[in-house]
Image (tube, coloured by chain):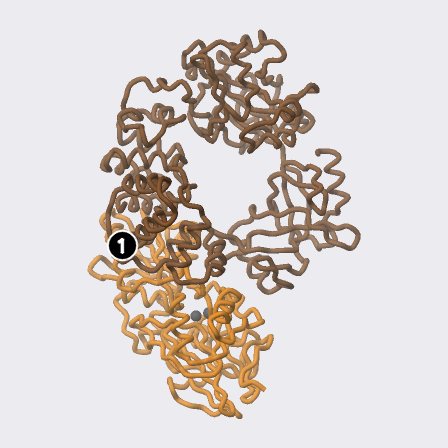
Chain colours: A brown, B orange
Amino acid sequence: MKSFAALFNAIDQSTKTTVKVAALADYFQTAPETDRIWTIAIFSGRRPKRAVTTTRLREWGAEVAGIPLWLFEESYPIVGDLAETIALVLPPPASDTDHGLSHWINLLRSLSDVDEDARKTEVLSAWDSLDTTQRFLFNKLLTGGFRIGISQKLMTRALARATGRGEAEMAHRLMGDWDPASTTWEQLIEAEDPTSDASRPYPFYLAYGLDAAAETLGEPEEWQAEWKWDGIRGQLILRDGAHYVWSRGEELMTHRFPELARALDFIPDGTVLDGELLVWSSDGLQSFNALQKRIGRKTVPKKLLSEAPVILYAYDLLEWQGDDIRQKPLAKRRATLCDLCDNLPSDTPVKLSPSVAFDSWEALAAIRATARDASAEGLMLKRLDSPYLTGRKKGDWWKWKLDPLTIDAVMIYAQSGHGRRANLFTDFTFAVWKGNELIPFTKAYSGLTDDEFRRITAWVKKNTRERFGPVRSVTPEHVFEIAFEGIQASPRHKSGVALRFPRMSRWRHDKPINEANSLDDLNDMLNTFG
Amino acid sequence: MSALTFTPSGIYCPAGDFYIDPWRPVPRALITHGHADHARGGMGAYLATDLAAPVMRHRLGDIPLETVSYGEVRQIGGASVSFHPAGHVPGSAQIRVEVAGEVWVASGDYKVVDDGLSTPFEPVTCHHFITESTFGLPVFRWQDQREIAAQINAWWAGCAAAGKTAFLGCYALGKAQRLLTLLDPEIGQILTHTAIENTNAVMRAQGIDLPTTVLAGPDLVPKDHPGALVLAPPSALDSAWARKFGPNETAFASGWMALRGIRRRRSGDRGFVISDHPDWSGLLEAIKATGAENIYVTHGYTDIFARYLSESGWNAQVVPTEFGGDEAEDAA
Ligand SMILES: [Zn+2]
Ligand SMILES: [Zn+2]
């Protein structure tokens, strides 16, 4: 695994995309083909089934390191990663081997077939023959969750360079439901007819946030505006008499949304739609809070299906009559999509996400300000003559989101971060006033600069009142502006509310704590926006 | 009354009426070493080792500073005091304080491995030992410094071959000079940032042997120094000064580089794990060697480390005050 470890180090240690692409491309040209396939699989989130529980791994790690389990458990949140914590506490290896990546993956796959004693023997002997980086990688494979900053874009660019083929083609080939154990390099990367797999989705086109005035985009008539929905981005594929629903994160969600099967009754085969999965009940579109009940559920009870039925609010058409039409301009694709949706009966689980008419940027800005009334997060701006691109590209699609809601709150608890921020205090609890009492209502752990985190860390150390395990209560002294995307009632919380995506948007050095907001202010927001 | 007590101004000796590494102005201060979180301005009188004195004068100016050599015993009031090598940076000391037969050692910052530059750490037998715990977790395990030197030199040679300047970020006092002695001058020239070169000059003047360096001042023309390595404080790595060197790679040398998360937060190209503090086994080794039963844990993962020591049979406690709010200088 040394060449894979070297690849990992090159990618992990560099901040420069060119260096990462070069290292990957080189690996794709030189490594054994089975190792290449597994590398693609791992870096795109496909991994062998977990054969050992993390509880066992912790116990074995502590045992081999000769430390009490509690000490291991205390170290883990500071390191921030289980695989890394184990790799670091283990004593140096007794031997030094160099088997390829596939060897270790096959070993992991074989662990499911043996009893726990045999698993332990295999894992311990692997640890004893690998250096720290290789151990970390081995543990990552064991525990899953290989997030190491390889974007889809980076991988497809490297594959394109290694094979001399196009990036968009590579992106398309990597999509979908292929199994690294039974897929060859030839099948995945080189064979003709990339659409041979009926379930294979197209890569999603992703928009950037608009970072300048809308006027800079040019003439309004060259643009289409749509509401930006607060749901789950999804792709609905109708091919060979079957349907498939994919999330933007390339997760196959067909069985989570069984109501979409009815689309087959009304929409012709050879159609692929891009849109937003949303709850649509008898009184129309529902807020994200309604969709939340459906998120994370692998199977859906009947009652929930009737309470919170999901539709695809379609805004783009990628394949029509079996043809990939992504290169046609948006205006053309949209016209076909409108024709299609116009003819659908009202109980079809697919509807057209309407476009928003406007004749000037000023008028559109006024419409955007009403987005919350439309249960939207803002607007999407799409250039009418744009093709459907692959991945995140600047220029043709923009998100024009509503400004977040904000509230000024007092910091009352602090907890140190992990991973990237192991030696800083980064997780904070905030409170608002209820009379003379400070009522905690949210946590937030992002939004400050590294320098601000360093300053608040130094302050927390000097102003700790009490310690509760890793959490410290601090003197109420600092006010922060908390920005968030939504608010809902939550009986589980002392404050009675829960926020969506809370983060620290500003350190209000200018505000004394008595000028922070109150619970009444929060309740007003709940009544208006909840 | 204990020989040493913990007060809001720092570690205090009532019998001798002095403080050790105080962080507020006091009449009399004994200083373990010149790092900014230990040697502060404004004290009425200072006592430190003769080896630490030049750097302290360089940093704090014309201070009322008296010096002692390692091992020399001074009587201060009812306390007899001596300074012993801590191995942390040149001149750094553990301070031994004996009052009526009770012996305390305030170890300041220390490391147990010999870096070839600082006088090596010497265990001092005592009843009460005050220890730091910067890296007091079992995940910290240092490699031999020759191994780290090989990694740094390989990286530097790679940069030089690719036509890039290698920027190595490190703290100016101690770490920089230790790295200097590890770099292979065959690869190229070693350039230094002013902050580091000033400290180098002070150490050379006191007879410490350091390799040849070139000051990368405002007049230096980078293209006259192809394949060079530049030693600079971390804050200078992302500055106009650094950018004028053109294509470059940056690395950072610190014990914190052992953690991938922190390595990535630094957002340089490389992180080398080298520290002037003890790793987990170094801490335990040092504590055992003192023979002390009472351990006071400061500066670092205090709660966890003290709990481990208590479970392992020591009478360990966390020092209640937050010493050294400013860890930036040598938390490495
Ligand atoms: Zn120090
Ligand atoms: Zn220190």
Which residue is found at the position 33% from the left and 44% from the top? A8
- Judged from this view, the residue extending furthest toward the left is B186
* Residue B194 lies in quadrant: bottom left
Give x and y (percent) for residue A444: 60, 47
Q: Is residue A197 left or right of residue B23?
A: left
Question: Would you say A456 lies left or right of A32 here?
Answer: right
The residue depicted at 61 percent of the width and 20 percent of the height is A360
Which is nearer the eye, A275 or A104?
A: A104
Location of the C terminus of chain B by quadrant is: bottom left
Residue A317 on image: x %, y %: 49, 16
**Rendered location of residue A28, percent (x, y):** 27, 35
Q: Residue A32 location in percent, x, y?
A: 23, 36
Look at 39% across and 68% down and name the residue there: B278
**Which of the two residues, A523 or A128, is positioned nearer the viewer here?**
A128
Of residues A356 and B45, the one drawn nearer to the viewer in this rendering: A356
Element under disc 1: helix
Q: In which quadrant will I find the N terminus of chain B?
A: bottom right
- Check disc 1 and report the residue beneath it: B156
**Three-letter amino acid code of the residue under disc 1:** Trp
- The chain letter for the residue carrying disc 1 is B
Q: Nearer the viewer, residue B132 or A374?
A: B132
Tell me where residue A240 sits by quadrant. Answer: top left
